[in-house]
Image (cartoon, rainbow, N blue to C red):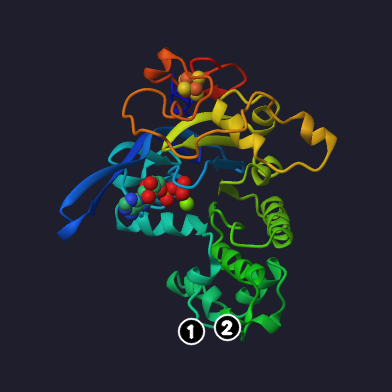
C-alpha cells in the first residue's frame, strides 16, 4: 500500500500520489534525435503540518523536478499533488495566486535568484508589492528576522557574501507569511561554516514561525539534524522513507547505505553508525539504462535475479518504507 493512501489525512499539508514526470530531450544534428528522461516516477509522500520533510538523493535524482511540480512550474504527467486536500492542478486563477503566497521557495544559488540591479530593500519588498502588503517597517523587520541590520537595505547583491545573499533570499521568501517553504539545496553553494549558520537560522525561524519545510539536499549529513522525516530518491524513484533518526540508525536500502557510507565522519560514535557492508568500488553511473526492475540494480552489490523485477515500496513497521527485495 502506498504511503499516501495508507493514511491520507485531511490534515496533511501535501499529499503526492503516484506522481511522474518525463522530459523529452532533443539532440543530434538539427536536434532530430529524441530521447525521454524519466525524471520522476511514481512518487508518493505526505508532508505534515510544521514538519521538516527531507528529500535526499544524488544530482539527477529528480529532487528539483519534484519541487517544481509542487510549485506549479511543471505539471505531472500522471498522478496528483494535493495541497491541504485540494488538487493543485485544478486551481483557478485566484486559488493559484493564494497558493503562490502560501508556498514559497529558496533555491540553491542566491546569486542567480536575486536580481543584481535591485537593492536589498526592493528585492525583499517585491513580493509584498505584488500582494499589496508593502508597509513601512515590514522590510526592516524581515531583515531583522534573518539577522541582517538596516544597513543592508541600500546594498546591491554583488556587495554581499554568499551567506548574506541567502539570508536576503530567505527574508524575501518569508515576506508573505507562507505556510510552506520549499528549500531546494539552499546551502549547497555555500562554505561549510556558512552552511551551518544558515541551517541554524532556518531551524530558529521554524520554531518561531511554525512553518512547514520541504528540505531538498544531496548531503545526508545536513538532513540528519534538520529533517523530521526523510525520503531517499534515486533516478526518480523512491528508495526509502521514514523518521530521519530511524533511517540513520537502521538504513534498509543499499542506496541509503551507500549515501551514509560517504558521509565524512569525525568521531567514533559517527563511525559506529556507518554501514559496514558497502564495498569500496561501486559504479558511479548506471551501466545500462533499464526500464524494468529495481532502479538501483546496476550499482547494487546485493543484486540477484529477482531484482530484474521492481520491488514494491512497503512499510517495514514504524512507517519505515523501503523498496528492496532484501530489506
Ligand atoms: N527541463 C528539463 N528538460 C529535460 N530534462 C530535465 C529537465 N529538468 C530536469 N531534467 C532531467 O531530469 C533528471 C532529474 O533532474 P532534477 O530534477 O534536476 O534532479 P536533481 O534536482 O535531483 O539533481 C535529470 O536527468 C535532468 O537532466
Ligand atoms: S532490490 Fe535488489 S538491486 Fe534493488 S536495492 Fe534491493 S538488492 Fe539491490
Ligand atoms: Mg536539483
Q: Are marks 2 and 1 in contact (CB under 8 Å)?
A: yes
Q: Residue at x 74, y 60 (%)?
A: 193
- Percent of width and height locating residue 32: 15, 53
The label shown at residue 125 is: none
**Image quarter (top left, top right, bottom left or bottom right) of the C terminus:** top right
Report the number of discs.
Answer: 2
Q: Residue at x 59, y 57 (%)?
A: 188
- Percent of width and height locating residue 119: 55, 83
Q: Quadrant of residue 31?
A: bottom left
Tag 2, which secondary structure?
Answer: loop
Query: Which of 281 and 249 lies nearest the eye of the viewer?
Result: 281
Tag 1, which secondary structure?
Answer: loop
Q: Earlier in the sequence, mark 2 or mark 1?
A: 1
Crowd band around label 2 with a 10 angstrom C-alpha radius: few (<14), some (14–19), many (20+)? some
Q: Is residue 269 left or right of residue 9?
A: right
- Percent of width and height locating residue 91: 32, 49
**Image quarter (top left, top right, bottom left or bottom right) of the N terminus:** top left
The label shown at residue 117 is: 1
Q: Which residue is mark 2?
A: 156
Query: Which of 144 and 92 lies nearest the eye of the viewer?
Result: 144
Please determine whether, in this image, residue 28 is positioned above or below residue 246: below
- Percent of width and height locating residue 145: 69, 66
Query: Which of 12 and 110 lies nearest the eye of the viewer?
Result: 110
Q: Residue furthest right?
A: 268
Q: Residue at x 42, y 38 (%)?
A: 235
Q: Is residue 67 visible?
A: no
CA gap between label 2 and label 1 equals: 7 Å
Q: Is residue 221 left or right of residue 58?
A: right
Amino acid at each position: 500500500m502506498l504511503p499516501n493512501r495508507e493514511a491520507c489525512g485531511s490534515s496533511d499539508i501535501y499529499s503526492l500520489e503516484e506522481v511522474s514526470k518525463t522530459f523529452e530531450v532533443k539532440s543530434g544534428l538539427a536536434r532530430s534525435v529524441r530521447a525521454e528522461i524519466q525524471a520522476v516516477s511514481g512518487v508518493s509522500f505526505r508532508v505534515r503540518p510544521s514538519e521538516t520533510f527531507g528529500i535526499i538523493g544524488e544530482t539527477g535524482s529528480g529532487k528539483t523536478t519534484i519541487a517544481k511540480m509542487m510549485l506549479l512550474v511543471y505539471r505531472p504527467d500522471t498522478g496528483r499533488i494535493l495541497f491541504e486536500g485540494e488538487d493543485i492542478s485544478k486551481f483557478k486563477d485566484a486559488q493559484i495566486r493564494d497558493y503562490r503566497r502560501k508556498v514559497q521557495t529558496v533555491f540553491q544559488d542566491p546569486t542567480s535568484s536575486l536580481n543584481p540591479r535591485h537593492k536589498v530593500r526592493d528585492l525583499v519588498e517585491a513580493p509584498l508589492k505584488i500582494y499589496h502588503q508593502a508597509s513601512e517597517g515590514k522590510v526592516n523587520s524581515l531583515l531583522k528576522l534573518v539577522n541582517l541590520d538596516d544597513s543592508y537595505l541600500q546594498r546591491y547583491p554583488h556587495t554581499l557574501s554568499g551567506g548574506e545573499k541567502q539570508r536576503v533570499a530567505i527574508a524575501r521568501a518569508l515576506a508573505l507569511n507562507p505556510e510552506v517553504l520549499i528549500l531546494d539545496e539552499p546551502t549547497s553553494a555555500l562554505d561549510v561554516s556558512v552552511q551551518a549558520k544558515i541551517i541554524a537560522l532556518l531551524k530558529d525561524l521554524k520554531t518561531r514561525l511554525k512553518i512547514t519545510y520541504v528540505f531538498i539536499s544531496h548531503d545526508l549529513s545536513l538532513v540528519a539534524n534538520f529533517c523530521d522525516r526523510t525520503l531517499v530518491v534515486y533516478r526518480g524513484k523512491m528508495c526509502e522513507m521514514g523518521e530521519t533518526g530511524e533511517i540513520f540508525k537502521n538504513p534498509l536500502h543499499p542506496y541509503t547505505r551507500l549515501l551514509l557510507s560517504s558521509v565524512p565522519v569525525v568521531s567514533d560514535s559517527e563511525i559506529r553508525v556507518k554501514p559496514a557492508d558497502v564495498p569500496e568500488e561501486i559504479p558511479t553511473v548506471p551501466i545500462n539504462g533499464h526500464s524494468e526492475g529495481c532502479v538501483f540494480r546496476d550499482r547494487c552489490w546485493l543484486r540477484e535475479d529477482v531484482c530484474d523485477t521492481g520491488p514494491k515500496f512497503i512499510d517495514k513497521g514504524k512507517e519505515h518504507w523501503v523498496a528492496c527485495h532484501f530489506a
